[in-house]
Amino acid sequence: MATKRGLAATLLAALVGGCAIATPFRSTAGGGDGGAPAVVALTEATLGPDSAARSAFWEGVWAVERTLKDQPGLIGYSVRRELLGNRTWTMTMWETEADLDRFVLSPAHRAAMASGRAALTGTRFARLERRRGDGPPSWAEALDVLGRTREGYR
């Protein structure tokens, strides 16, 4: 019987292992002129097996998420993660590069980067420009862009 349960768990993990879930893109009051350019920041983080480090990573993600509504120039954001895996992604859309850079250097983001670093086994980063009125890229497009980038570390 244990063999059947083990096989069922293995099959379930194989089926769900590639599955991911994302929050809806949460828009803020930012955005303004729909024809103006905006910058989209994409991240991919691969987490290691250390559960304490992973917990610290997620605490940092949630702490940053709580500050996003107060970030100048933010148009919106979404977070995506594998259901039974070790990868997670973020997508944020900003009015300007300067707004994005200011956020990256913000105390909440810097603290999250410091506390979550131990969980990381690899990262990728990409930025792309879009018209504000076009909204954010789909996750399929975002993953394609990230898949073509080498920026980050492994």
Image (spheres, rainbow, N blue to C red):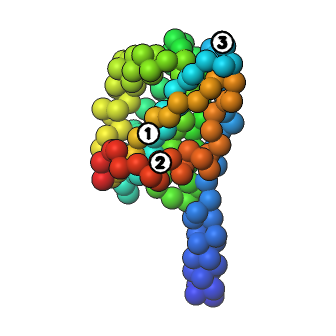
Q: Nearer the viewer, residue 29 or 82?
A: 29
Q: Position of residue 51 (x, y in %)?
A: 40, 51
Work out whether residue 123 can be spotted: no
**In terms of secondary structure, where does tag 2 sit?**
helix
Residue that mark 2 sits on: 146
Q: Could you classify mark 1 by the number of other residues whose Cα lies within 10 Å: few (under 14), some (14-19), or many (20 or more)?
A: some
Question: Is there CB contact under 8 Å for labels 2 and 1?
Answer: yes
Q: Nearer the viewer, residue 49 or 96?
A: 96
Amino acid on which the number 3 mark rests in the picture: Gly
Amino acid on which the number 2 mark rests in the picture: Leu
Residue that mark 3 sits on: 32
Q: CA distance from mark 3 to mark 2?
A: 27 Å
Q: In terms of sequence position, does the residue under pointer 3 or pointer 2 come before the other?
A: 3
Furthest residue in direction front, as rendered: 35
Q: Nearer the viewer, residue 134 or 67?
A: 134
**In terms of secondary structure, where does tag 3 sit?**
loop
Q: In terms of sequence position, does the residue under pointer 2 or pointer 1 come before the other?
A: 1
What residue is at 52 percent from the left and 26 percent from the top?
39
**In terms of secondary structure, where does tag 1 sit?**
strand
What residue is at 52 percent from the left and 11 percent from the top?
72
Q: Position of residue 67 (x, y in %)?
A: 51, 19
Residue that mark 1 sits on: 126
